[in-house]
Image (spheres, rainbow, N blue to C red):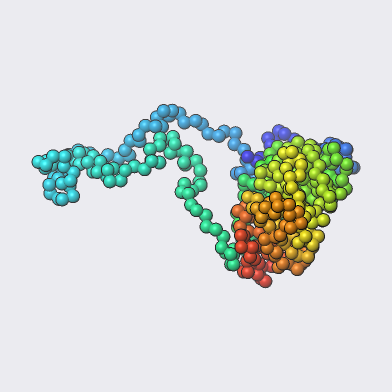
C-alpha cells in the first residue's frame, strides 16, 4: 500500500509537509518548498538535498488530502471472536408459532397426496408438513457443490468486489472502435509544457504525468473530476521519461542530464543519483525504460550500449552491447527479457538472467528504425521508422525463420503506412488486441491498429477529435 506522508513528528518526509502547510492556512495551489542539507554531485542526495547556494532541488504541492488508497492501515481488523461457532448452522430469523397448531389434509389435493408416507395417512401437523415440503424440494433440486462450504468459507467471498461468475471476454472486433471521450486526466493540474510521459499506477486508479516543466503530477482518475493528489517539482531536471517501478512504490524520473531522480512514495523520500555506478558518466539519461514488474531499468547510452540497473538498489547490473546505435528497447512481461533495435536495422533478443544475446536478426523493412515494442504475451512485436511506416511481426514466424538461418529473410506480418511523419512510439495494450502508433511532428498523428487482422480502425481518431501533437 502506498503512503504519501508520515507522522507529523517526522521532519524529513517530502509529502509530510503538505498537510502541515494546509493547516497553517497556505493555499492548496501554492507550492510547498522542501529543503535539506546540501550534497555533492559525486554521490546521491536523499530527502531532497539542496542545490548550490542553498536553494532546494525540489518542492511539492497538493490539491487535497491523499485518497483512501494512499493511506496505510495500522489495524487490519480484529479476528473473529466466535472461533468454531462460524461453522454452526445459522438459526432461523423468525418462527411462526401457529405452524405447530395447524393441521393439513394430505388427501384433499393431488399435489399433497404425494407427501404421504403411508396410504391411509390423512392429516399431519403443520411442522411435519413443512419438513416434508423441504425434503421433496431437496430431492427435486439437490444442493450444488459450492453450497457445501462452511460459514467461514462463505465469508471469504464477501471480501472482494470482483465478479463471482466466470465470464468469457468478448474479443475486440475490427473496423469500428466503440470509444467514448471522458474528462482530461490532468484537468485539475495541467502541465506548463508538453506532457512527455504519462503512465497509470499498476494497482491504483492513479495517473502520473511529467514533462519539460520539471514537475511530476499525480491524479486520482475517476473519469469525472480527476482530482490532483499532489505534484513534485525537480528544479534541475526537465523530465523526458518517468515511470512507476517496484510495483508502484517508487517513481523514476530522467531527462537530458547526467543525473536522475528516484521518488520513494511509500517512505516519502526523494533521492538524486548523479550517475550510474560502474559506468562512465553519460551526458544524457533521457532514454530510459522500466520493466513491467519494476525490477530493472534500462538506460540507452552511446555507441550501441544498453546499461541495465537494479530498480531497488540502483546498482549497475550489466551492459548489453549492440553493433549500431540503439534506437529503442522494450522489456518482456516477466522482466527477464529485453528486445532492442538499432539504427542498422538489427533486432536483438536478450536474456537478462544471463545477460547475453539469445538471437539477432536483420530486418531490411524499416527505414532507420525509431521505436520498438513487444506485446505482453510475446506473440507480436512492432517497430516504427523515420518514413512513418510501422511494421508488425508475428514472433512465431520470426523464430521459425531465424531457426532456418534466415538472418536477412525476416518479413513483417503487415506494414502500416497511415502516418506521414516519423514514428515516435508504438504501444501494445494488455491483451495484444490493440496497437497504438503515433508521431509528434504533426497534429492528430495517432492510429489504432486491430490485431490479429492488422487493420486500422476507421472511425477514430476523427477530424473532430482534436488530439493535438501526440507526445506519449
- The residue shown at (77%, 60%) is 364
- Given residues 64 and 444, the one toward you in this image is 444
- Given residues 31 and 206, the one toward you in this image is 206
Query: Viewed as shown, does residue 198 lie left or right of 452?
Result: right
Q: Position of residue 7 (x, y in %)?
A: 68, 35
- Residue, far front: 404
- The residue shown at (73%, 45%) is 358
- The residue shown at (83%, 40%) is 276
- Residue, far left: 120
Q: Quadrant of the C terminus?
A: bottom right
Q: Taking the image as drawn, is residue 358 in sight?
A: yes
- Residue, far bottom: 463
Q: Position of residue 429 (x, y in %)?
A: 64, 55
The image shows residue 458, relative to residue 58, as above or below, that is: below
Query: Viewed as shown, does residue 157 lie left or right of 1?
Result: left
Dividing the picture into quarters, in which one does residue 420 lie?
bottom right
The number of numbered discs placed on residues in the rendered structure image is 0
Q: Position of residue 371 (x, y in %)?
A: 76, 56
Q: Quadrant of the N terminus?
A: top right
- The residue shown at (38%, 41%) is 145
The image shows residue 4, relative to residue 227, as above or below, that is: above
Q: Taking the image as drawn, is residue 196 in sight?
A: no
Query: Viewed as shown, does residue 47 lie left or right of 397?
Result: right
The image shows residue 448, relative to residue 359, as above or below, that is: below
- Residue, far right: 53
Q: Position of residue 225 (x, y in %)?
A: 62, 56
- Given residues 164 and 382, the one toward you in this image is 382
Amino acid at each position: 500500500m502506498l503512503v504519501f506522508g508520515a507522522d507529523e513528528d517526522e521532519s524529513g518526509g517530502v509529502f509530510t509537509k503538505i498537510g502541515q502547510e494546509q493547516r497553517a492556512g497556505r493555499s492548496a495551489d501554492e507550492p510547498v518548498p522542501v529543503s535539506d542539507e546540501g550534497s555533492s554531485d559525486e554521490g546521491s542526495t536523499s530527502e531532497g538535498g539542496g542545490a548550490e547556494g542553498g536553494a532546494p532541488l525540489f518542492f511539492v504541492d497538493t490539491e487535497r488530502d491523499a485518497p483512501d488508497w494512499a493511506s496505510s492501515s495500522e489495524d487490519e481488523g480484529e479476528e473473529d471472536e466466535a472461533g468454531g461457532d462460524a461453522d454452526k448452522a445459522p438459526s432461523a430469523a423468525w418462527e411462526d408459532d401457529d405452524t405447530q397448531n395447524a393441521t393439513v389434509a394430505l388427501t384433499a389435493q393431488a399435489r399433497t397426496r404425494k407427501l404421504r408416507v403411508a396410504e391411509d395417512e390423512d392429516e399431519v401437523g403443520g411442522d411435519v408438513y413443512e419438513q416434508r415440503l423441504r425434503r421433496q424440494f431437496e430431492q427435486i433440486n439437490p444442493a450444488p457443490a459450492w453450497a457445501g462450504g462452511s460459514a467461514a468459507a462463505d465469508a471469504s467471498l464477501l471480501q472482494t468486489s470482483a465478479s463471482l461468475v466466470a465470464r468469457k471476454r468478448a474479443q475486440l472486433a475490427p473496423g469500428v472502435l466503440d470509444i467514448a471521450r471522458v474528462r482530461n486526466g490532468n484537468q485539475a493540474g495541467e502541465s506548463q509544457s508538453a506532457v512527455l510521459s504519462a503512465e497509470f499506477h499498476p494497482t491504483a486508479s492513479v495517473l502520473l504525468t511529467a514533462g519539460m516543466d520539471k514537475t511530476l503530477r499525480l491524479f486520482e482518475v475517476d473519469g469525472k473530476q480527476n482530482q490532483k493528489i499532489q505534484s513534485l517539482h525537480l528544479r534541475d531536471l526537465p523530465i523526458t521519461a518517468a515511470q512507476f517501478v517496484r510495483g508502484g512504490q517508487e517513481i523514476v524520473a530522467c531527462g537530458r542530464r547526467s543525473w536522475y531522480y528516484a521518488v520513494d512514495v511509500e517512505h516519502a523520500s526523494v533521492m538524486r543519483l548523479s550517475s550510474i555506478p560502474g559506468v562512465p558518466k553519460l551526458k544524457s539519461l533521457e532514454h530510459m525504460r522500466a520493466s513491467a514488474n519494476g525490477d530493472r531499468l534500462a538506460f540507452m547510452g552511446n555507441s550501441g550500449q544498453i546499461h541495465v540497473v537494479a530498480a531497488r538498489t540502483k546498482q549497475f547490473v550489466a551492459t548489453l552491447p549492440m553493433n549500431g546505435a540503439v534506437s529503442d528497447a522494450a522489456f518482456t512481461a516477466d522482466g527477464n527479457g529485453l528486445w532492442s533495435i538499432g539504427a542498422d536495422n538489427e533486432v536483438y533478443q536478450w536474456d537478462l538472467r544471463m545477460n547475453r544475446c539469445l538471437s539477432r536478426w536483420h530486418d531490411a523493412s524499416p527505414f532507420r528504425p525509431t521505436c520498438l515494442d513487444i506485446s505482453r504475451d510475446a506473440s507480436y512485436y512492432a517497430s516504427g521508422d523515420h518514413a512513418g511506416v510501422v511494421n508488425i511481426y508475428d514472433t512465431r514466424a520470426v523464430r521459425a525463420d531465424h531457426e532456418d538461418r534466415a538472418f536477412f529473410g525476416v518479413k513483417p506480418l503487415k506494414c502500416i503506412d497511415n502516418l506521414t511523419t516519423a514514428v515516435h512510439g508504438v504501444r501494445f495494450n494488455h491483451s495484444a488486441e490493440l496497437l497504438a502508433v503515433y508521431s509528434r511532428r504533426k497534429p492528430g498523428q495517432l492510429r489504432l491498429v486491430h490485431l490479429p487482422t492488422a487493420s486500422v480502425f476507421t472511425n477514430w481518431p476523427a477530424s473532430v477529435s482534436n488530439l493535438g501533437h501526440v507526445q506519449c
